[in-house]
Amino acid sequence: MTESEALEALKYAGKLNPGPWIAHSLNVGHAARLITQKTAEYDPEKAYVYGILHDIGRQYGFSHIKHTLDGYKYLGDTEIKAAYICLSHSFPNKNIEEYQGEMDLPESDLIKLENLLKEYQYDYYDQLIQPD
């Protein structure tokens, strides 16, 4: 996904569910690009795109852990790396029990989320978008 396509997706998502998460997503993208520009081995545009899309699951309304899986489902068919970052940004240790919020998913979806995280190998971009 290009930068302009990601911005369009975020703009549309903001119309569906306006709120401070839009500015947060833009700030994460901006920070990710600035940090990545200091490297010679990673792509600043990809970092920006992944940053602005990490919370795209919030377009469906207020939620807690659910937004991670919603984002994954939304992007999974078109932008698989960004889809996984929707998951990984909330789970630096791949442990859903460490999530700092409400578990607003049915048990079957929590199991799916846990399995997706176990199977997935984090890389630079995942770690870049994760909070410290």
Image (spheres, rainbow, N blue to C red):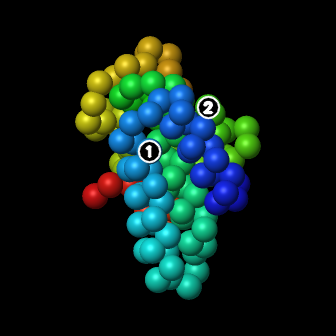
Residue at the image point whose x is 44% and y is 45% from the top: 22
| Relative image position of residue 84 (x, y in whole percent) | 56, 45
Is the N terminus in the top left, top right, bottom left or bottom right quadrant? bottom right
- Name the secondary structure under disc 1: helix
Q: State the CA–CA distance, disc 1 to disc 2.
A: 19 Å
Residue at the image point whose x is 54% and y is 33% from the top: 15
Give the class, few, some or many, for how many residues have Cα within 10 Å of label 1's Cα (few <14, many ≥20).
many
Q: Is residue 122 visible?
A: no
Q: Is residue 132 visible?
A: yes
Snapshot quadrant of residue 27: bottom left
Is the C terminus in the top left, top right, bottom left or bottom right quadrant? bottom left
Q: Which residue is mark 1?
A: 22
Give the class, few, some or many, for how many residues have Cα within 10 Å of label 2's Cα (few <14, many ≥20).
some
Residue flagged by tag 2: what amino acid is it?
Lys
Residue flagged by tag 1: what amino acid is it?
Ile
| Relative image position of residue 49 (x, y in whole percent) | 58, 58
Question: Is 126 located above or below residue 110 in the figure?
Answer: below
Residue at the image point whose x is 36% and y is 28% from the top: 64
Q: Which residue is mark 2?
A: 73
| 45, 90: nearer the viewer | 45
- Name the secondary structure under disc 2: helix
Q: Of label 1 and label 2, which has the lower sequence position?
A: 1
Mark 1 touches mark 2? (CB < 8 Å): no
Question: Is 128 located above or below residue 40 in the figure?
Answer: above
Foreground mark, 1 or 2, reads: 1
| Relative image position of residue 126 (x, y in whole percent) | 48, 57
Residue at the image point whose x is 60% and y is 68% from the top: 45
